Structures are given as C-alpha cells and as structure tokens.
Amino acid sequence: MKTLKILHMYADMLDLYGDSGNMEIIEYRCKMRGIGCEIYRYSVDSEMPDFSLYDLIYIGGGADLEQQHIADDLLKCRNGIEKAYKEGVFLFLICGGYQLMGKYYRDADGNKIPGLGLFDYYTVAPESRKKRCIGNIVIRTEMTGKPVDVVGFENHGGQTRGVKTPFGKVLYGSGNCSKSESEGYFEKNVIATYLHGPCLAKNPEISDYMIAYCMNRGADSLQELASLDDKLEMECRKVMISRLLNKKK
Ligand code: GLN
C-alpha cells in the first residue's frame, strides 16, 4: 500500500493553538488503517526540497511577527510549491499559512508581507489591534459533494477578500472577514482555512478527505477508506455545534 509523504513547513514558527496536532491526527488515522505516513519538516534555511515528491504540504498559523520571519524564505520556495500544487500535491493551510498563499498580507502596522500569489485573494488587518475575529466558528463545507459541518476556533486580525471558491459557508462566527458569509479557500487539492483547534481533531471528515485524495492522486474519484470508530469525536462535535448554533449570533 502507498505511504503518504507529508512536508510540514515552518513547524517551529507557525504553530498557533496546537496546529502541529493536525499532523498527529493524519498520522493516527493513516496508522489505524495500515497506511504508512512519513512526515518531513522544512524550515527557514533548510535545504531546498523537491516539493513535488510529497503528497501533502502543510503550513500552520502564526502571529504577524512569525509571518514576517518566514516570509523571505517562503518566497524562495515559490516555484517549487507552485509546481507541486499544479501537479496535484495537496496544500493544507491554516490561518497565517492560508494568508501567505494569496497575494499579500498587510498587518496592523501597515507592513506588507508578500504572499506567493498562488491564489487571487489578499488579506488586510485593521489598524486597531482590538478588531480581531476571535472565537468558536462553525462552517458548512461541501468538500465531498455532501454538506459537512466543520467546527473550530478562529483568531485573526486579517480580513481576507477576493476568495472565489471558499472552503465553507459561515453558520456561526466570522470567517474570512468580520461577520462574513464565507470561510477559507477550497480547490480539489487545497484546503485553506482560519480554523485552529487543531481543526482535524474535531473534524475527522477533513483528514479523511485529504488522505483519500492523496491515496488516489490524479484519479477522478477519492480512494475508499476503511471507516474508523469516530463515535467520541462525533459526539463531541455534536455538542459543540449545537451549543454554538443555538446561541444568537
Ligand atoms: N497574524 C495573522 C492575523 O492576525 C494570522 C493569525 C493566525 O495565524 N492565527 O491575521
């Protein structure tokens, strides 16, 4: 059986709210199915990898300062990441990582951090640091063609605009901008979202979508995966989602 190869970028700097835990969840869900999973790390000044050799590239979220620290290094990786993405490598991006794949991120002090420009969106933080989107969030996604509600926690100043294909519709919380209707960015091989949590612990469907995609990369359909016992996760989600959706916005 295929072994999944994952490249986790900037784990030492972009790891807000346990974002690195997302890698543990993927590894666990592969292991439970007898699928091999190798996770490699890349950070500032590591040797330039061949990004196309991986099945999935993962970048977590971070504060403005960390985003500035990695920005120049990330730009050096632009061509390799773009080539990999075009060849169908999966990109999984959280918050700060999501912002930096767009055109740019302008922080609260007006510093413009260039993004890789892989996608058309751009992000601007309001001057007032008090105006942040913070709290629990529920969105409705359609990643597998069926509606799947996803729950997480967001904390971002950045307001992301120009997203043509969002990851989900906001049912509770803010999303791409304060009180916006849409959240994140989605393509068949891209999930970019503001959801921390780490979000995969709370949303097994997202992990399985990515694993199924990577196992069958290049094919029209997703690989069928053996089902796992997610009773506990599903019950936790149900409690959290109904608690939030029954509250007034
Ligand atoms: N620094 C960015 C912002 O505030 C990203 C934050 C994050 O990754 N949680 O918008």
Image (tube, helix red, strand yellow):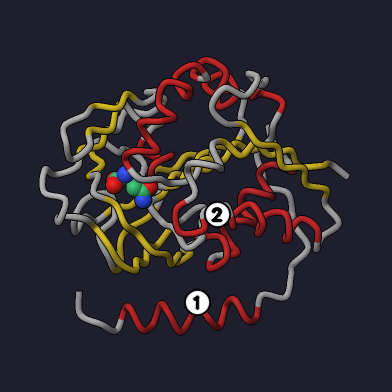
Q: Is residue 188 left or right of residue 110?
A: right
Instruction: Tell me whether circle 2 and circle 1 mark residues in contact (CB < 8 Å).
Output: no
Q: Height in image: 89 above or below 95?
A: above
Please give the name of the residue rendered at 50% of the width and 39% of the height, measured from the top-left corner: 190
Mark 2 CB near ligand 1 (8 Å cut): no
Q: Which mark is residue 45?
A: none
- The spot of residue 161 in percent (x, y) is 23, 39
Q: Cα distance, mark 2 to mark 1?
A: 19 Å
Q: Quadrant for residue 70, please give it.
A: top left
Image quarter for residue 72? Answer: top left
Total numbered circles: 2
Tell me the quadrant of the picture where the N terminus can be found: top right
194 left or right of 91? left
* Coordinates of residue 67 in the picture (x, y in percent): 38, 35
* Other-residue count near label 2 (Cα within 10 Å), few / some / many at <14 / 14–19 / ≥20: few
Residue 45 falls in image quadrant:
top right
The mark nearer the N terminus, 2 or 1, is 2
* Amino acid of disc 2: Thr
Question: Is residue 139 among the parts visible in the rendering?
Answer: yes
Tag 1: amino acid: Arg
Neighbor class of circle 1 (other Cα within 10 Å; few <14, some 14-19, many 20+) is: some
> Can the viewer see residue 188 in this picture?
no
| Label drawn at residue 237 | 1
Q: Residue under circle 2?
A: 144
Q: Which x, y percent locates residue 25?
A: 65, 59
Q: Is residue 37 placed above or below 218 in the rendered structure?
A: below
- The secondary element bearing badge 2 is classed as loop
Identify the element where label 1 is drawn: helix
- Farthest residue to the left: give it: 128
